Image (spheres, grey):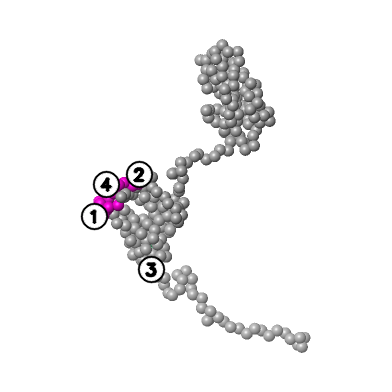
C-alpha cells in the first residue's frame, strides 16, 4: 500500500518519477483511467461519496493507483484509492481494487500496543494480578548468581533461594529510575536543601550493591517508606536545627494578652443636641 506522502502528488509528477523505463503506451493507458476509477467508486459507494481527483501513483509497469478525496461520515481526510491494471497491448485498463486509505490529515487511531505492554506504572490496583513476562530481562532464575556479591553470599550462607531474582541489568535500570525520579538529587525537594539523605538519621541503607546509592526514608513526615537516593534530601533531615525561640522561625508569636484596651468614646446624646 502506498504511504500517505504520495497520495496528493500530481499525476504528471508521479509518472515522470517512476515510469521513464516503462512502456509509454501502457503508462498512458493507466494514467488516463481516471474516469473508470471514479466510476468504480460510484458503483461501490455512491456518487456523493467521491470528491476531487488527487493524482496517481504507480505500483509496477502494469498497474497504477488513482486517488480521490472521500466524502464519508467519520472519514475526514481519507481518500479513495483505486488500483487499475493493464497488460502490454491492452486497449483499456481494468479495475483491480477500490479501498479507503488515510490521507495526510486524516484522524487515525493510535498505534496498536500489544496487551502485555499496555500496563503502565501506577495502573496496578488492589486485587490485580500482574505476572512478569516469561522472558522478563529484569529477572534471572534464583539458582544463577544474581551478580550482586553480597546477595549471593548471604543466600548461599543461609541456604535460601528464590525461584527468580533481579538480574544485574534489572537492578541497574531500577537504580537509574530511582536516581532520576521523585526521590533523586534532581527533585525539587532535594534542590531546595543542602542536607542530603546520606547523613540523615532517618536514612535506612539498602542491603547489597544498591546500598551504595540508595536507602529507605523512615521519617513519617517526609519520604517515609520510599527509596531515596544518597543525594536526595529534605527539610526534615535529622540534623535540621531547631528554630530559635519557641515559635515559628519566620514569624514572631502573636500574644493577644498584650492588646491595648481603650474605652469607646461616648456618642453624642440626643438630649445634648
Ligand atoms: S528525612 Fe529527608 S533527608 Fe532524611 S532520609 Fe528522609 S528524605 Fe532523606
* Above or below: residue 249 compared with residue 197: below
Please state, as top left, top right, bottom left or bottom right, where the C terminus lies in the image. bottom right
Residue 99 image point, x, y percent: 58, 29
Callout 3 secondary element: loop
Q: Nearer the viewer, residue 121 or 179?
A: 121
Q: From the image, tell me which residue sits under label 2.
A: 137
Q: Earlier in the sequence, mark 3 or mark 1?
A: 1
Q: From the image, tell me which residue sits under label 1.
A: 159
Q: Residue at x 40, y 62 (%)?
A: 224
Spatial CA span between label 2 and label 3: 46 Å
Q: Residues within 10 Å of mark 4 (few under 14, many from 20)?
A: few
Q: Residues within 10 Å of mark 3 (few under 14, many from 20)?
A: few
Callout 4 secondary element: loop
Spatial CA span between label 1 and label 4: 14 Å
Which of the 4 image quarters holds residue 34?
A: top right
Foreground: disc 4 or disc 3: 4
Asked whether residue 235 appears in the rendered view, the answer is: no
Magenta residues span 136-162
Q: Which mark is residue 144?
A: 4
Q: From the image, tell me which residue sits under label 3.
A: 241
Amino acid at each position: 500500500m502506498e504511504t500517505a506522502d504520495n497520495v496528493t502528488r500530481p499525476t504528471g509528477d508521479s509518472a515522470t518519477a517512476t515510469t521513464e523505463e516503462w512502456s509509454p503506451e501502457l503508462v498512458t493507458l493507466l494514467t488516463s483511467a481516471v474516469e473508470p476509477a471514479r466510476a468504480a467508486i460510484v458503483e461501490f459507494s455512491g456518487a456523493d461519496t467521491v470528491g476531487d481527483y488527487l493524482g496517481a501513483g504507480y505500483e509496477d509497469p502494469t498497474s497504477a493507483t488513482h486517488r480521490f478525496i472521500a466524502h464519508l461520515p467519520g472519514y475526514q481526510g481519507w481518500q479513495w484509492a483505486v488500483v487499475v491494471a493493464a497488460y502490454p497491448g491492452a486497449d483499456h485498463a481494468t479495475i483491480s481494487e477500490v479501498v479507503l486509505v488515510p490521507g495526510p490529515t486524516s484522524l487515525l487511531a493510535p498505534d496498536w500496543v500489544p496487551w502485555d505492554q499496555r500496563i503502565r506504572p501506577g495502573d496496578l490496583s488492589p486485587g490485580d494480578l500482574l505476572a512478569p513476562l516469561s522472558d522478563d530481562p529484569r529477572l534471572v532464575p534464583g539458582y544463577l548468581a544474581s551478580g550482586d556479591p553480597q546477595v549471593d553470599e548471604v543466600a548461599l550462607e543461609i541456604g535460601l533461594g528464590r525461584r527468580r531474582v533481579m538480574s544485574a541489568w534489572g537492578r541497574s535500570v531500577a537504580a537509574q529510575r530511582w536516581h532520576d525520579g521523585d526521590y533523586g538529587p534532581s527533585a525539587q525537594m532535594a534542590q531546595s536543601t543542602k542536607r542530603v539523605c546520606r547523613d540523615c538519621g532517618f536514612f535506612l541503607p539498602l542491603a547489597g550493591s544498591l546500598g551504595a546509592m540508595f536507602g529507605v526514608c523512615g521519617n513519617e513526615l517526609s519520604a517515609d517508606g520510599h527509596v531515596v537516593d544518597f543525594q536526595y534530601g529534605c527539610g526534615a533531615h535529622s540534623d535540621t536545627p531547631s528554630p530559635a525561640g519557641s515559635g515559628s522561625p519566620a514569624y514572631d508569636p502573636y500574644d493577644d494578652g498584650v492588646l491595648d484596651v481603650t474605652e469607646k468614646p461616648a456618642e453624642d446624646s440626643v438630649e445634648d443636641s
